[in-house]
Amino acid sequence: MKIRTILPAVLFILTGCVLFAQYPKDETIMPYPKPVKERTLRQRFVCDTTGPPTWKALHHSLLNPLNDSLKIESNGGDPYVLLPAVEKPHTGTFEFRIKMKNKMEPGAEIFWATQKQPGFLPENAARFNFLNDGEWHTYKTEFTTDAPLTNIRFDPGTSPGIAEVAWVELYEVVYSDEPLKRPDGIDPYWIANVENWKTISSDNIKIKFDENGRGAVVFVDEKAVGEIYPLMYVDLNLPLGGCTSIPLVDDTPASSESSGSDKYSGALPLSFATGSKTSIVFSGPFQGKLSFELKGSELRFQMKSSENFFGPVFRPYGEMEQAILSGVEYLEKGEHSSSTADIETKEHLRFAPNAMDVTWPFMAVVTEKVGFGLLWDNPKVQSVFATPDFIFGEPTKHHMGLYGKELSGTVKITSKKHPLPPEVTQLDNLILWAFQKHGLPELPQRPRDDEQQRLLNLAGFEKSIGAGPDGTGWRHAAIPGVEKQSFPLLYGSDFVTAIWQLTGKVPNVPKLDNGGAHLQNPASFFLTGRGEDFRNWKKNESKLYRSWQRPDGSFPYAGKYLRGHWEDTASGHCGNTLYRLLYTYQILGEPEALDAALKGLEFANKYSVPRGAQVWELSLHTPDIMGASRMCMANVWAYEATGDKKYLNAAKVWAVRGLPFVYLWENKPGEVMRYATTPVLGATNWVAPNWIGLPVQWCGLDYSEALFMLSKHDTIVDWKKIAEGILVTGEQMQYPDGPSIGLLPDSFKLAIQKRVPADINPTVLVMQRRLLDGKLESLAVVVSPDKKFRVVSPYPTKLETTADGKPVAVIDAPSGTTYQVLVNGTEVRTIESKGTDRVE
């Protein structure tokens, strides 16, 4: 992601009026491929480099013609080649087919140029994965141009290696305009008289099953609130695995014999086998069975079959109020899934995502009638999620299901009968239920011991991001091999503090620039005699932030990333400023900062989805883990400042809302995945990169900071363990050697275990490792109970009381050192340490 530091933020906040872009609620989601009316081969690109027209190697690549193919040899991480020019440029929808064998790391991309846009732009790209088994396969991907197509660039992989291409074909595709159809055999009017159906019940819940095995109706307090329909079905036309699945083309002739689930179509009628008051079992025209058991408000299901089927489809009734698919969707009233609000490419279709995009196996839909939360057992099975149910085409029902041979899990059925505290939603309760039932995985293995970790972090500063103390400073992040770096060298106060924490020595710098890292670590101001500079910075910053606030407490946004959202503010956008105001209050005790922050929290705590915290590159609408972390931190500090438990309760709720962004499973033992964090549920500039399934751990470290803070006050969840897991996974992602040694990659591709630049300074890793080791993370702040005495210090500090009842700050500093403290937000004192120093 484009990385931003905590230097005075360009938040694009304006106080004028703005015109809001409408959320695309009326767009039609088409989950099934349209029937092809006509497919015409327009050009076959032969693999010949000996004469015109020729292929050309552009970057990190060499081309060598073979007898019947072209060998592409990649000598870097970003190879790409140019195909011969398109012979007859025209506008249309095109299908790109390529026959190749490949041993590079997936995935592949094509970029296209047009007469209107002759360059290869990020928005004119289509991505696909491939099998790197060195065998011949044919792949296809599709794109549409708005001007005559002129050229195609092919990126064969993401690593050094060899690919061979037999041919490329470019088809023009025309689709029919046939309307969306339900799968064959799905009957929207399947429910008849349920009086004589087999019933299982528990508490106030009854589930009545059709004994012919079509489905069931769920009742709460004798009212129908949802259904399980169908119990099992087959739909060969529903694309699975999301847009990141491998688009193989079958080149083999069709067999006259059908096999597998081809002999089934649509909903499968099952035979009633056995039943009791709380459980029921069905069998069907396959080897296996399907069972349900109801205990309290939890419905347990298990399906085992000889073939892949879509398992029970749980369909709550009514208008959706909130919904979630962990790591993929986070919705509230008025929205629908698979929308283009956050992703405008074909990757917005995420109703059946790649399993590795799902952070943990949980989905839920809450309506005005009921809440269904589905926690399934095997995170590797295919999930299917649509709200409203555009898969079956019914706007008043919602689709929650799985696909595979062995499917099992638990559905939580929540009643809308009992009111909740204003800061808690039904979805919050379902997330917490599923998280506690799922359980926390074991912490990842630390990649190195304390001393090795210290040396690696230090190497990040000394070797990777700057010239060091005798040069011109350090960078926030670096991209190896790039001559012109995006981030300037600066004497960041966070960097100087981190180096002091790693070495015990304060770098000799001519000045201090504010910030530098994603979280503030400003002790260096008080170690270099610049405490007054820090005080003035925070005072002026507070004044600026307060000037942005509207009378209702909110902070408006105006800019290009407003498109797709229904208002000019959001939880994370407000949280970015509120947590800074409350940090200033911690330091200065400034009542104006506290008043503004509390007013802002009264406004922002009404939201139910964390979103809009990264409007430097993403839509204000985009769900965002930092929206959860900033709101959590702000509420923790508000609780510490006021003692009012409503802020602590709100902090817990925002922490719960961040859990769906955290990976709680691993694809393979030993790989980096557990406690990795999806940053946002959207794409930069609505196009690329698409961050779903692409962890960005610096965003997760922001969330872990909030959890460390919350863990001091709450144990409803083991917040500290989650925070430690996120930290250790960040340390696993660090570069152990090379030009970026000690740095944290901006993102990490899970499927191929690859680090992706830009590569970020390790300041936050230093801070949180110190916190876990029981050391002072950053500045120490002590405040007397009456809030009239406040001391800020760069060394461990505690509050004591003198014999006559007056508060005193006791500071444990190395004897002989000189440092400064800030007293009551107004007075900077310089102290020559005696080892234990007292400030009255």
Image: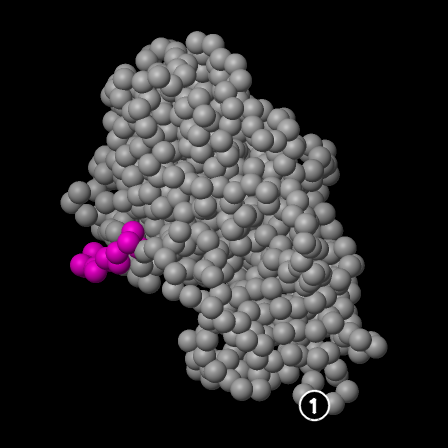
* Residue 435 seen by the camera: no
What residue is shown with label 1?
52
Image quadrant of residue 84? bottom right
* Residue 407 seen by the camera: yes
* 70 up-or-down from 728: above or below: below
Q: Amino acid at mark 1?
A: Pro
Neighbor class of circle 1 (other Cα within 10 Å; few <14, some 14-19, many 20+) is few
Q: Which residues are magenta?
A: 13-26
Q: Residue furthest bottom?
A: 52
Main secondary structure type of the part rendered in magenta: loop
Left or right side of 201 for 39: right
Numbered disc 1: secondary structure: loop
* 593 up-or-down from 216: above or below: below
Image location of residue 76, percent across then percent down? 72, 65
Task: Name the colouring of the figure.
Answer: one colour
| Residue 22 within the magenta-colored segment of the rendering | yes
* 42 up-or-down from 782: above or below: below
Image location of residue 699, percent across then percent down? 49, 45
* 281 up-or-down from 630: above or below: above
Nearer the observer, 60 or 488: 60
| Residue 137 within the magenta-colored segment of the rendering | no
Q: Residue at x 75, y 62 (%)?
A: 136
Left or right side of 158 for 511: left
Image location of residue 757, percent across then percent down? 60, 57
Q: Residue at x 60, y 38 (%)?
A: 308
Nearer the observer, 214 or 4: 214
Q: Residue furthest right?
A: 67
Quarter of the rendering occupied by the C terminus: top left
